[in-house]
Image (cartoon, grey):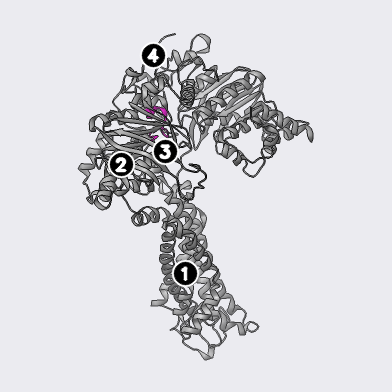
Amino acid sequence: MAIVDIDDMYFHYPRAALGEGDEGWTLRGISFEVTAGSTLGIVGESGSGKSTLIRVMCGLLRHQRGTVRFEGQEIGEFRGKGANELRRKNQIVFQNPRRSLDPRMTIRRSLTEPMRALQGRKPDDDELIVSLEKVGLGREVLPRFPHQLSGGQLQRVGIARSLSVDPTILYADEPVSALDVSVQAQVLNLLMDLRDELNLTLVMVSHDLGVVSRMCEEIIVMRDGRIVEAGRTDAVLTRPESEYTAALLAAARLASLEREVEAPG
Amino acid sequence: MSVTDIDTVPDVDTAIPAAPKSLWRRLRRLPITLYLGGALVSIFVFVALLSFVWTPYPPNQLNMSNRLAPPGTPGFFLGTDRGGRDVMTELMLGARNSLYVSVVSTVVAMVVGSAIGLAVAGSNRYFQGPLTRLVDAGLALPGILTALVLAAKLGPGNTTATLAIIIWQIPVAARVTIGPARQVLALDFVEAAYGYGRRKPYILVRHVLQNISPLLIVLGSVMFAAAILIEAALAFLGVGVQPPTSSWGRFLNETQALLDAAPYLMFFPGLAIVFTALGFNLLGDGLRTVLDPQQSRSGLS
Amino acid sequence: MLEIRDLRVHIDGHEIIHIDELDLPPGARLGLVGESGSGKTMTAKAIAGLLPAEAKVSGTVRFDGNDLLALNDAQFARIRGKRIGFVFQDPARSLNPMMRIGRQVSEAIRLHTDLKGRAITDKVVELLTQVQLPDPASLVRRYPHQLSGGQQQRVMIAAAIAADPELLIADEPTTALDVTVQAEILRLLISLSEERQMSVLFVSHDLGVIRYVCDRVAVIYGGHVAETGSVDDVIDRPRHRYTSALLAANPGMPKDDDFAAFMGQRLHTIPGSVPAVGRFPSGCRFRNRCGHASAACASIPSPVTGADGHRYSCWNPGGED
């Protein structure tokens, strides 16, 4: 069953200089579906619109043309309580954990924010500790401020914060690219574990094809605001149909640890 | 290698607390401007408050036998003025008036100004440009002229002076708030807050205001210095406080006729004004250094 | 070309860096790999004499026979830019936004060569052609913001090689770039190094990139060289436990027929995170995160040298030569 259903969607930022046809639009004619419980990887280079796309999908940005449906309902039509539910069910983990937590709020306060905002309740420490333990942290982080934690710990806090309101979809925007190599693996494993345990739909933006081929059954390759190629990850990456996907793949293999015979180019 | 359970191994980062620095070492790292400014401001506030319970002589006590006594005269440490009033008493009472006007005007201008600044920064893109220009127009208001017009309408007095300073300073506070507030609004944690359902007013107060508060503290002390100077200027021009209340500015005005006979009379209130304003400016400078996040993070990257 | 012996950097009383021995042969490309806070960038800066004044540097860094650390500022300035070129991580920040491309590239030529007037312009165009920028003749009149990130980095490289340096120090030169652009820049660096017999000191957090670019690699952790040797030895036959852990934590790419087995597979993890500067444990820097640590690790491991200069400092090494 499709949980998100996008059809011929266009998006541009305010004050974009729009031209002939779809010139100036950040996202152009996007159509695809996300199956409930699946994991989707969105790959592309900077400026491809991949980060913008997930922000439109979860309702943080409003598209101008086409439709984006969540659980069958157009995303712009959620109002009042419904809008809160939409927010609650669509949660995001951001790229840079140090920037996505308010430096002047304690971890305790940051963790309780979604529940205060969306459910109007203040959880007690016991409840917070349970959600911290899910991401491999303990109660000792509660009174701390972000600058007192490492990047990996902060990203765990970010994940715990997103999961605190029981979302159905978790969007992850390059969740490990700001972390040290030795810490990335911990966070990726954690995301996989939580996805399986909580039966989450996971939509992950990444520039790393290795990460995507490990985590995502399906993949969307984006360039210049358009979908270049989409399908099952193994199919797309073993037999890429577009030249662009092939180029991305070649570049990824070149910088991988294998001693590769370099593709001509 | 074997996969080790991450939970059993503490992060060194958190497991080993930084060696606590001794209080003395931490105090020594604070900038000298903070100490200088703090000292000058403390003296000013202390003197102003002291004037409520003690002055060398009762306020406005005329002493005709001791008119224009030079500084150092027994009983009159800083001398007396034309009416034989003790200069030290007058200056202490002037400090009180200066403190009163500056506190009221700075607090009101800060609160209103930064609220306007936050609102403009948070307004949607159609209003933001015009509103910012409006604040800029407010900045261009000639302050002294505003005060003169107000005085013509309301009559001179402390209220007029305070009001004039407020009107003068609100656009300053607003303009200084807009830029940093917009920067904070562009940060990731603000987007995260939208992501979990917070709305703009809450974000402006809870996230933006809190993150620009160090800046507002610095701004407050600089505005305080300005308020002291403006209060003195308005009193000097006769727009501010009226007799019998004492004021540094008016004291200056009254003594300028005696520039030849007793030049030292202008010296003391002038000095009081300069050092108090300097004190608040230094304090602001020191606070800026201390509160700058780049300074407080001692780590090396 | 470059011989580092007992290089130490102290800041605030902490010993941040201690590189006992590290060599870069002429014409070779040496990778310094490490995570943030490992000291790899600081090592490169110490070699280049670019550390802030509060850093105390000791030891020797021999460059073509001269000890760089013994030079005064004026002497160093004659070597920097002329015999040692630099490329930094973020080209957008390394280029002066108010200066035309031609002027920025010609700076090193004016400073370090005798060329004048028309000859300088010709040389700039030649350099821009060498770094494979399109239409170099008109490019010299452009400003940095008119170029893409990849093009800006090519300009930086052109400026770095303008005075024909014998050594190029590149600090994460492709980290700010997209993967396809990264591949082009890496190819360019390799071909320039080979054409000019120019040694390269390549600093990166990415072992995959290092393997592609470099012949030799030094794995840096906590300011120490954990392991060094040829890239094949270090990456295919790692001995130090940190190196093997880092390799195992890499997400990697599946082979074409491997996707099914790859999917959903958990990665090997390294517990904890890289300590803050100055908070590494004594002895082996990695021992508090190492699955194989023993009592011996409380003292600094003595280096073991194998074939082809494969050297590691680990009390409980894995694998075998």
Q: Which of marks 1 and 2 is in front?
A: 2
Q: Tell me the chain of label 3.
A: A
The type of residue carrying mark 3 is Gly
- Chain under disc 1: B
Q: Dot 3: within a 10 Å radius of its alpha carbon, few (fewer than 14), some, or many (20 or more) residues?
A: some
Segment tinted magenta in the rendering: A173-184
x and y percentages locating residue C39 in the rendered image: 49, 30
Which residue is label 1 attached to?
A: B44
Please state which of residues A46 and B191 is positioned toward the viewer in this rendering: A46
Q: Mark 4 lies on which chain?
A: C
The answer to whether the residue labelled 4 contacts the one labelled 3, judged by CB atoms less than 8 Å apart, is no
**Mark whose residue sits in front, 4 or 3:** 3
Q: Residue C86 occupies which quadrant of the picture?
A: top right
Disc number placed over residue C318 in the picture, else none:
4
Mark number displayed over residue C302 = none
Front residue of B128/C158: it is B128
